[in-house]
Image (cartoon, rainbow, N blue to C red):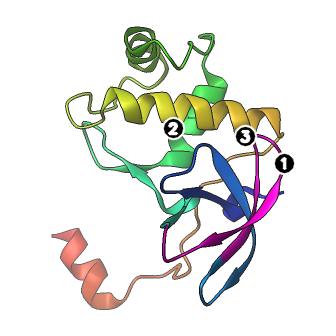
């Protein structure tokens, strides 16, 4: 199982491994209970974990970067049901998080998801740029 295959499904708890997609939905396996099911795209929205970004006090970062920092942190994971403990954890594990725009519910979700990927021995991987080189116009604008 690879990090790039993980999805979050609106209205459903936990993470899923995307097995295959269809015109009207997807077949996915739950990381919580290992059940495989069809999930309709008419009733749910899918978000690939590798495309989710998190607000920080600087530029937004990919969720994988937060997960990597959580893995390197010496702090014990808090109970995801205690919002104060979760916020205190992130202030130590990932202090650049923008605590005004990242809600306690989002942080609780990140703790829960991190527990699931850790339990399933999935290594979070930062997405790579498909375009390694910038066009001359973009490089010129970013240099200014």
Q: CA distance from mark 2 to mark 3?
A: 13 Å
Above/below status of 73 relative to 84 = below
Q: Residue at x 44, y 26 (%)?
A: 94
Above/below status of 38 relative to 87 = below
Do the residues under discs 2 and 3 have CB atoms within 8 angstroms?
Answer: no
Instruction: Report the span colored magenta.
Output: 26-43
Q: Residue at x 34, y 30 (%)?
A: 96
Q: Where the N terminus falls, by quadrant?
A: bottom right
Which residue is disc 3 drawn over?
Answer: 117
Above/below status of 68 relative to 139 = above
Q: Earlier in the sequence, mark 2 or mark 3?
A: 2
4 sits to left or right of 108:
right
Q: Nearer the viewer, residue 133 or 24?
A: 24
Q: Nearer the viewer, mark 1 or mark 3?
A: 1
99 sits to left or right of 9:
left
Q: Is disc 2 surrounded by few (<14), some (14 to 19) or many (20+) residues within 10 Å? A: many
Q: Position of residue 27 (x, y in %)?
A: 74, 72
Q: Position of residue 29 (x, y in %)?
A: 78, 58
Residue 122 within the magenta-colored segment of the rendering: no
Q: Where the C terminus falls, by quadrant?
A: bottom left
Q: CA distance from mark 1 to mark 3?
A: 13 Å
Q: Nearer the viewer, mark 2 or mark 3?
A: 3
Q: Secondary structure at mark 1?
A: loop
Q: Residue at x 63, y 34 (%)?
A: 114
Q: Position of residue 115 (x, y in %)?
A: 68, 30
- Image quadrant assignment for residue 117: top right
Q: Position of residue 34 (x, y in %)?
A: 84, 48
Which residue is disc 2 drawn over?
Answer: 66
Q: Is disc 1 surrounded by few (<14), some (14 to 19) or many (20+) residues within 10 Å? A: few
Which residue is disc 1 drawn over?
Answer: 34
Q: Secondary structure at mark 2?
A: helix
């Amino acid at each position: 199982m690879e990090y790039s295959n993980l999805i979050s499904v609106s209205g459903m708890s936990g993470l899923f491994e995307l097995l295959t997609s269809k015109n009207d939905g997807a077949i996915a396996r739950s990381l919580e209970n290992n059940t495989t099911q069809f999930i309709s795209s008419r009733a749910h929205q899918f978000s690939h974990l590798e495309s989710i970004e998190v607000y920080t006090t600087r530029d937004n970062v990919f969720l994988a970067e937060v997960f990597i920092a959580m893995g390197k942190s010496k702090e014990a994971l808090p109970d995801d049901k205690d919002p104060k403990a979760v916020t205190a954890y992130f202030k130590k594990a990932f202090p650049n998080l923008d605590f005004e725009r990242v809600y306690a519910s989002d942080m609780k979700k990140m703790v829960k998801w991190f527990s699931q990927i850790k339990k399933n021995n999935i290594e979070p991987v930062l997405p790579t740029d498909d375009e390694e080189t910038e066009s001359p116009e973009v490089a010129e604008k970013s240099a200014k």
